[in-house]
Amino acid sequence: MILDDVIEFLKKTPPFTLLDDTALKAAASSVSMEFHPAGHTILQQDGPAPGHLGIIRSGEVKVFLKTGEGEEVLIDYLKESDSFGLLSLLGGDISRDNAVAIEDTVCYLIGKETVFRLIEANAAFSAFYLRSFVQKILDMLYREMHDRSMLYGGGDKMLFTVTLNDLISGKAITAPQDIPIREAAERMSKNKISSLVLLDPDGFPAGIITDRDLRDKVVAKGRDIADPVSAIMSVTLIKSEARDYCFEALLKMIRYNIHHVLVVNRGDIRGIITNHDLMLMQGVSPLSIAREIEGQRTIDGLVPVSKKINRIITILIKEGARASNITRIITEINDRLLRKILEITERKSGQPPVPYCWIVFGSEGRKEQTFKTDQDNAIIYEDPAAGEEEEVERYFSDFTLCMKDALVKCGFPVCAAGYMAGNPRWRRPLKAWKGYFSAWISEPVPGAMLLSLIFFDFRPVYGAFTLSERLRAYLGHVLKNQNMFLANMADGIAKQKLPLGAFRTLVVEKSGRHKDRIDIKINGLSYIVDIARLFALETGVYNTSTIERLRESRDRQRIAMEFCSELEQAFEFFMTLRLRRQFGQMLAGAEPDNFINPKELSILEKKTLEESFKIIAKVQDSIRKRYSTWS
């Protein structure tokens, strides 16, 4: 190693830039070099303390902690010129965190004695590292506080974290200031709004009229509704910038005793914020939306509440919540919404002739819903007495028709493939469902295998849960010793083609509307979903969540034990990419999909994507070897 090269490198690397030439040369003279291949653990939490400070010459290192529950807490991703290991070096007993090479990494190592001399002799050098550690610790604390505040309530906190742009749901309705009062009132009524922005002849905001103006200045005063609306408009138009936090708008409403604030973006009208909108900030928290759902008595009353759910996702994404936490929250809220729709529909339809259980499957069954989910549901009902079959079928036929329409109203589109309780095939007595499951398992032809992949993810949401539990227990019973079925399922997983080229490079769509993109749901999430399902069915895990299936299978199945952590991380990463993609599309007013462009990812994200597919490829190889003898 050439001393001059090391000196030139350290000259550009804080805090060594603070050293004079003599100290810099002395430090460089003690440097050694070390290579770490991708995936290598450089420092192990609670392991031996390092005897040196590491400085990255090239490559990338991930530094993180592991909690007592096994959760990974990210500290930082380090790249060229970043250093690591100082805190553990100063402690001298154990390593305080984990450091893992993300890619092939070359490090310069500066010995413990040299580092101690530099810290003692140079106050600026010492202060640099102190500030660095404090900042990282604060960042971690703020991330944790944000996660907790967003997950467990606090509309007051959201006033300080949500911008007016995030809160606005639609464009402001405007009108010329010279139209009659009657026409202004008609426009407000037609658009179901409480205020109307009035424009001057040049198209600039001249004033505002509210429903209060109509009451106090027109109805109460007996004013002629043919008068121009400018005669009653408020010319004091208070504005806020779209980038301002909601707290700023709230202050203006208090200060000026107003109920509406015009929101502009660089002079262009963006929308209107009302005091009602800000009061409903508490309604953006998951708990308050759940309470609002419970307070409704009609389907029409649930419609506006259901539209708030996507707002929760956007806020949680912006606050850095984990994808798995977001999907769990959305599932809980959607479950509550679904139960309320079922309660209302059941009350309207009358007492059901037999006990029943409403089940869901697909992403809803696995508790992995994002912005958009269609109707994937079915009904299990108690076996009717002889002669009552027709009456029972007639009731559930009418009932499921009402449910389908109500769910569409609340934002759940119908399933194009017809996997809904409205389809007579998927509203059946328990004995019929047992017959389905038994047939699919004993004769695993392609069509039967597809149905098992769909319906074996079922989860109860409403009604007599014992029916679902009995069906799940029956499934576990008939799966015992069904090696042929599991082998066929494993064969399908092993044959799935990953989007990796000959040299393990990413393969994207070559043409069409999704050119240069990868479907992260079909070519990512679904691989891990299928793997986790296989492990769960083999080991008797009843849970339907992909992450929970992996965790519960870990102690029961060799492949799960070996790859569980990597598959969990890959699943979380894929879900994060999917949510981020859909979030961006929602902001742009586009229909959300699952297609990501690797070129739009950072170097680290692209590398993580490639490594995630490589992990899945390894699992496929292990599955191929394990299950090939079962057939």
Image (cartoon, grey):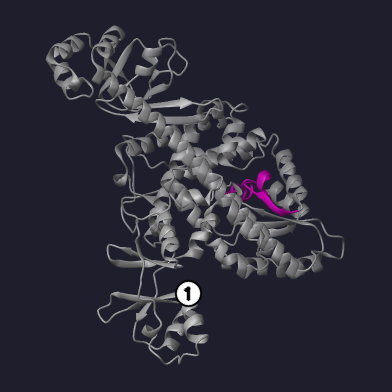
User: Looking at the image, is 18 positioned above or below residue 587?
Assistant: above
- Determine crowd level at label 1: few under 14, some 14-19, many 20+ residues with C-alpha closer than 10 A: some
**Which amino acid, by three-letter code, is at mark 1?**
Ile
Q: Quadrant of residue 176?
A: bottom left
Q: Looking at the picture, how far across and down is residue 226, in whole percent? A: 42, 92
Q: From the image, which quarter does the C terminus lie in?
A: top right
Residue at 51% x, 65% y is 276
457 or 261, which is in the foreground? 261
Image quarter (top left, top right, bottom left or bottom right) of the N terminus:
top left
Q: Is residue 340 visible?
A: yes
On the image, numbered disc 1 is attached to which residue?
193
Instruction: Give the camera-side residue of 1 and 210.
Output: 210
User: Which residue sits at x=85%, y=65%?
Assistant: 388
Residue 116 in picture, x, y percent from top left: 29, 10
Viewed as shown, does residue 500 lie left or right of 453?
A: left
- Asked which quadrant contains residue 289, the reply is bottom right
Taking the view exactly as shown, the residue that stands out farthest to the right is 386
Magenta span of residues: 440-463
**Along the viewing direction, whichever of 428 and 548 lies nearer the viewer:** 548
Residue nearer the viewer, 471 or 594 = 594
> Residue at 33% across / 58% down in the picture?
512
State left or right for residue 427 relative to residue 167. Answer: right
- Picture coordinates of residue 601, whole percent (x, y): 32, 43
**Magenta span contains residue 444:** yes
Q: 11 above or below 552?
A: above
Q: Secondary structure at mark 1?
A: loop
Whether the magenta-drawn stretch holds residue 193 is answered as: no
